[in-house]
Amino acid sequence: MTLRTMVVLGATLITLSTAGSAQEKPGFRDTPMLPGGQWRVHDADRPAPVVVTPAKQPGGAPSDAVVLFDGRSLDAWTPQRSAWPIKDGAMTVPSRASAGGENALVSKQSFGDVQLHLEFRSPNPPTKTSQDRGNSGIWFMQRYEVQILDGYRNPTYADGTVGAVYGFKPPLVNAARAPGEWQSYDIVFERPRFAADGSLVRPAYVTAFLNGVVVQNHQAMLGTTAWRQVAKYTAHGDALPIQLQDHDSPVSFRNIWVRPLPEAAIAQDLKENVK
Ligand code: MG
């Protein structure tokens, strides 16, 4: 038995022998420090994660979620012109003719870093082609669009199909379901960081699963979503509404919830001097 093995075994025995004690916490106080200098490996004093109760059904809102649409009420949203009609637990973008113009939905609450779940359904039967077929979108901070489109057998430009960071990054794969079928988005959005002088310190990042398939993997965003232009950043506040796009397609939505994310949830790069 090596000295190292004896030390490890000894530490394990100490832990086991005190397992029944209310005072002692599981873990170690003699292990090396992790990068950052705050906690040891397996640190006994490191706070346990906050308990969140997941939903009974996959895709349901967990206990700490902010529910933005539960199938019954538009209370969490401000429509730009008129309410999106709700039927059978789903809301649908109304026609431009009935609304009198572009009629996006804007969340009353503002968010920065956030996890989002949303389900959408492309109009069936499909009409029109390319960008005019089932177009909507999730605009984080009213600026950064993750595209919603009927991407099923609908040729269009790659950076504009469903799952795209619109105008910049096509989805890794086309995981679209057929029109008329419910589809799910699960997205983690990390807001951009700006210096006091307005210069960009860190771009926005997005990780997105479409129907359970990863389509964006911690993808940097280029800037405020633009059409036929290269996106660029303009400094803004740390929290802004989420907007659902009206692109004159009767796209339906249900089961929308978010979880605002603390700073600790944001992807952290290892420092260069970490071995
Ligand atoms: Mg769109």
Image (cartoon, rainbow, N blue to C red):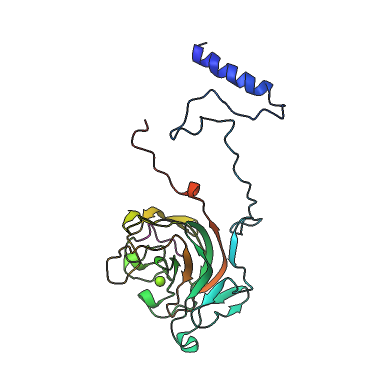
Residue sitting at x 58%, y 70%: 76
Residue 48 relative to residue 152: left or right: right
Front-most of residues 76 and 165: 76
Residue sitting at x 59%, y 16%: 10
Q: Magenta stretch?
A: 170-176
Residue sitting at x 44%, y 59%: 238
For ligand 1, give the image quadrant: bottom left
Front-most of residues 136 and 82: 82
Give the percent coordinates (x, y) of residue 159: 33, 65
Residue 228 relative to residue 117: left or right: left
Q: Is residue 174 magenta?
A: yes
Q: Let me know if residue 38 appears in the view.
A: yes
- Asked where in the image residue 108 lies, by quadrant, the reply is bottom right
Residue 246, above or below 267 = below
Residue sitting at x 54%, y 22%: 30
Give the percent coordinates (x, y) of residue 107: 52, 70
